Image (spheres, helix red, strand yellow):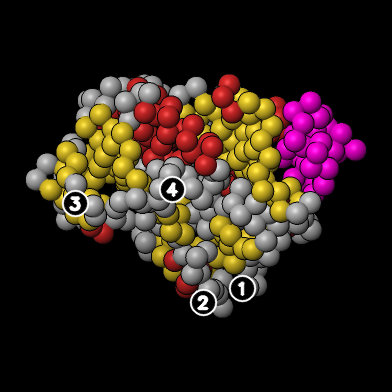
Amino acid sequence: MLGEEPHPPYERPQLSKAMLHAPDAPVAYIKQASDWSDILAVRLETGSAVIDCDADRRIVATADGRSFAFDRLLIATGTLPRRLAALENSAIEIQYLRNVEDALRFRKSIHDKSRIVIVGGGVIGLEAACAAAKNGCRITVVESEQRLLARAFPAVVSDLVAARHRSHGVEFIFGATVSGSSSDGVRLSNGADIAADLVLVGIGVEPVATVAERLGLPSAGGISVDAYGRTAASGVYCAGDAALQFSRCHDRAIRVETWANAQNQAIAVAGNMIGETREYGDPPWFWTDQYDLNIQVAGDMLEADHIIRGDTNCGKFSVIAMRGADIVGALSVNSAKEMAMLRRVIAADKRPARADLESSAYDLRAALK
């Protein structure tokens, strides 16, 4: 197993969650470095960026000049943060949040009680804002859309999240982008200048496609795979954030940038690499913790009719997304048990009656019978 980072494999959700909320939170590794070889008999090569791949000779090459032969190859190169060109030559400190070093750097910054501009009102930016606000930082979030997480949340939940952040002192500027830097901060497309000690950029990611490109595989928007994780190259598979896979909920191929997908798709693909036949088609699922809100999303919430179960004013409810009779997505706020059932209903492609779903008294277990 070749990995560009110097660390053994670790859990990425912690980078914007646990590691930012405690000044001494340790890095949670998937396994200790010695366990890979001693228990799993896996040769782990860290600090080994793969820069080339020869499909005919079935060899990959690393930046330090070594070569590794393969019979079957798994591309699990993930993504890198999308850079903000308008700030590339800025004198102000610019940070991104993707690896352990990034998290440790931002953690130090927020304990210095900095003035922070966060570009992008997505999950990463909002989780970072939450941690920084709790540490007394002055936070301004700049979001190009008119509301938070517009590509994943219905408006009622976007508004709830924004209100919770505002109650902790976070300010929002919607419908604007960062166009450059000013003498002590950033300049926005609407002409405003925002003072800042540093800027955290969270405007999405791009798949790392070096290996795919060397193999001649199309990689625009991701590395295409079938339900078994196979690419168009013989013996070459892909899993995780870089994989472009079909989603029944979205009715199209998408990249799924979630911890659950990185884990579960990889498990299925690993089986296929050793001769099993395991299709993978789990509905996308992710969660975010912000202040006292635990929000979970499964499937696709866009371009659908929304059914609300529970009282949105009490901070505990669910939203179900439907297209016709099909449940294509669900979102829960502080309702983890209901989300667990909704995920099962979506995965099983069940179609309970709309009237039942609209009743919070309806037991979702009945839909699985």
Residue situated in front as seen by the camera: 328 or 284: 328
Which dot, 2 or 4, sits closer to the camera?
2
Question: Residue at the location (9% across, 45% down)?
Answer: 183
- Residues under labels 3 and 4: Cα distance? 45 Å
Which comes before the other along the chain, label 3 or label 1? 3
Q: Secondary structure at mark 4?
A: strand
Mark 1 crowdedness (10 Å alpha carbons): few <14, some 14-19, many ≥20: few
Horizontal side, residue 102 vs residue 113: left or right = right
Name the residue that disc number 2 marks: 216
Q: Quadrant of residue 48?
A: bottom left
CB within 8 Å, label 3 to label 1: no
Kindly identify which numbered label has been placed on residue 233.
1
Give the quadrant of the C terminus.
Answer: top right
Q: Is residue 237 above or below residue 270?
A: below
Q: CA distance from mark 1 to mark 4?
A: 25 Å
Residue bearing the label numbered 3: 191
**Mark 2–mark 1 contact, CB under 8 Å?**
yes
Q: Residue at x 36, y 23 (%)?
A: 168
C-beta proximity under 8 Å, tags 2 and 4? no
For label 1, the SS is loop
In the picture of the structure, the residue carrying the numbered disc 4 is: 46
Earlier-in-chain disc, 2 versus 4 = 4
Which residues are the magenta region? 341-369
